[in-house]
Image (cartoon, helix red, strand yellow):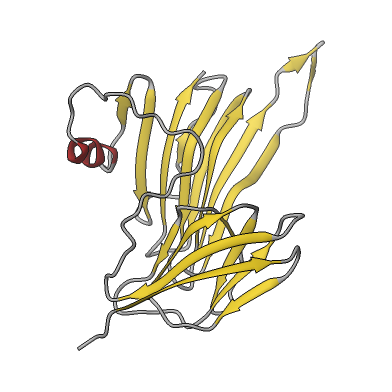
Amino acid sequence: MSTASYRKLAYAIRPGDIQDINRQGDFFHVLSADGDFAVAWDDGSATPFFAGLEYEVRDGRSFNKVQIVNTGGGVLNIEVGIGRGGIRDSRLTTSGPVDARDNGGASFGDVVNAAEEAQWLDFNGVYRKHIDFDFDPNQSIIGPNAHNRVEILHAQLSSGSNTTAKFILTYSPPVVGGIGLPVISDLPLLQVSNGASASIERVRVPWTVDLKYAHGGPGCALCIAYRFL
């Protein structure tokens, strides 16, 4: 019989320092933080993190160590939770402005279920997609020459254990004065490995763009919401 546990921890980390947390768990989340930081598990590669984001391992696995790296220029005050066995802190953690307007009468369950459907959805010009490791990495999520400008509202990339996933951008600047500027090719917007995840928000690409998702196998996934400008 597995034992459930949960521990809330708070730290003040100096710039450039690493805070080791030697505690076993199957999930880790950040309740609050006032600066930039990255997180690594079991001495793996650190990935950028932020308040409200949660990392979870499944299938009976667990991690034994968490490392928090202060990547900012000031002291990082951070409060985190580590646990196992399904215990969660149910308080709401947000980052950035919160839109509390009426969504037109749909229930919260309706909104969540719609956003998680594995198909293209059009919500007033916003397209959402969830793709896993079965997706052919040679295909484009947003193909070149389809539209001139794209805004990525949110993208979250996850990798499986012992795998690497990438969210790659290629864009072509316009021709100026009869001279074409160099094409920027295979620029990783996100890259994660060994069970980590990371996300970006509000990225605008003003020129012809090609977005691709490359993965190393099971456990990798990309969730993206974007719109054409």
Quarter holding the N terminus is bottom left
108 left or right, relative to 220: left
- Up/down of 146 relative to 78, above or below: above
- Relative image position of residue 61 (x, y in whole percent): 35, 79
What residue lies at 72% left-to-right and 55% top-to-bottom?
A: 72
Q: Residue at x 67, y 40 (%)?
A: 185
Q: Position of residue 164 (x, y in %)?
A: 52, 63
**225 or 37: nearer the eye?**
37
| Total tally of numbered discs in the picture | 0
Residue displayed at 36% across by 39% down: 129
Residue 24 drawn above or below residue 93: below
Residue 111, by quadrant, is: top left
Query: Seen from this angle, which residue lies furthest top?
Result: 177
Q: Is residue 105 visible?
A: yes
Q: Residue at x 36, y 35 (%)?
A: 128
Q: Quadrant of residue 116?
A: top left
Q: Position of residue 80 (x, y in %)?
A: 49, 65
**Residue 45 visible in the displayed image:** no
Q: Name the spot of residue 168 as percent of width and height, x first.
A: 57, 45
Q: Viewed as shown, does residue 228 lie left or right of 175?
A: left
- Left or right relative to 115: residue 15: right
Q: Nearer the viewer, residue 67 or 193?
A: 67
Say if 70 sits above or below 24 in the image: above
The residue most toward the bottom is: 1
| Rendered view: 30 above or below 1 | above
